[in-house]
Image: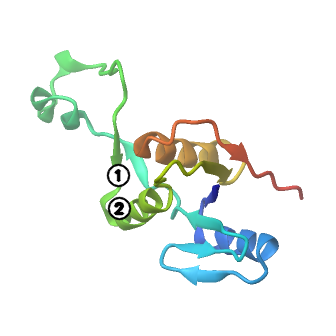
Amino acid sequence: MKTVFIAEKPLMAQAIAEALCPSYTKKDGYFLGSNNFIITYAYGHLIELSNFEDYSEHLRTWRYEDLPFIPENFKLSPIKEKQTQLEKIRKITKVENGEQLLLINATDSGLEGQLIYHYIASYLGLLKKPSRLHNRT
């Protein structure tokens, strides 16, 4: 089974790696633990709600008649400057040959952290319910 933690930022991912896998290796976009844990991270928001023009060509020009615009299904778009890390997460979470994936949401436990994880999981099609890493302070 492949176990992948998705943290909100690199320092958080490193702290998780240090706590769970004392002899971890830093890779490009993630940390690999000796126990085959993979701890990857976002850089805050990697994905955002799509702009109006992404829904329809006629929305490229603002018109009062088109407002309010509330789509039936909201679309998500990667933030261009952060797309490389999103692709690394896609590669890390890919499973092959019947392998099972255990996803651990390791973002901050507040609404923003949950939204960051939810957008990543939705955009990449990782729709199964993740486990949740809770921090106790």
Q: How far across and down, in percent of the image, does residue 105 sit?
A: 66, 50
Residue at 32% across, 21% down: 71
Residue under numbered circle 1: 78
Q: Is residue 66 left or right of residue 137?
A: left
User: Split into 4 quadrants, where in the image is the N terminus?
Assistant: bottom right
Name the amino acid, label 2.
Answer: Gln
Label 1: few (<14), some (14–19) or many (≥20) C-alpha neighbours in 10 Å: some
Residue 131 left/right relative to 6: right
| Above or below, comparing residue 128 to residue 81 in the picture | above
Please name the residue shown 52% across and 47% down the image: 98
Apparent side of residue 60 relative to residue 40 in the rendered image (left or right): left
Q: CA distance from mark 1 to mark 2?
A: 6 Å
* Residue 115 pos. (x, y %): 56, 43
The relative height of residue 63 versus residue 95 in the rendered view (above or below) is: above
Please report the residue visible at 41 percent of the width from the left and 43 percent of the height from the top. 123
User: Residue 67 lies in what quarter of the image?
Assistant: top left
Name the N-terminal-most of marks 1 and 2.
1
Under circle 1, the secondary element is strand
Q: Disc 1, disc 2: CB below 8 Å?
A: yes
Q: Residues within 10 Å of mark 2 (few under 14, many from 20)?
A: some
Residue position marked by numbered label 2 in the rendering: 83
Residue 17 at x, y percent in the picture: 72, 73
User: Quadrant location of the C terminus?
Assistant: bottom right
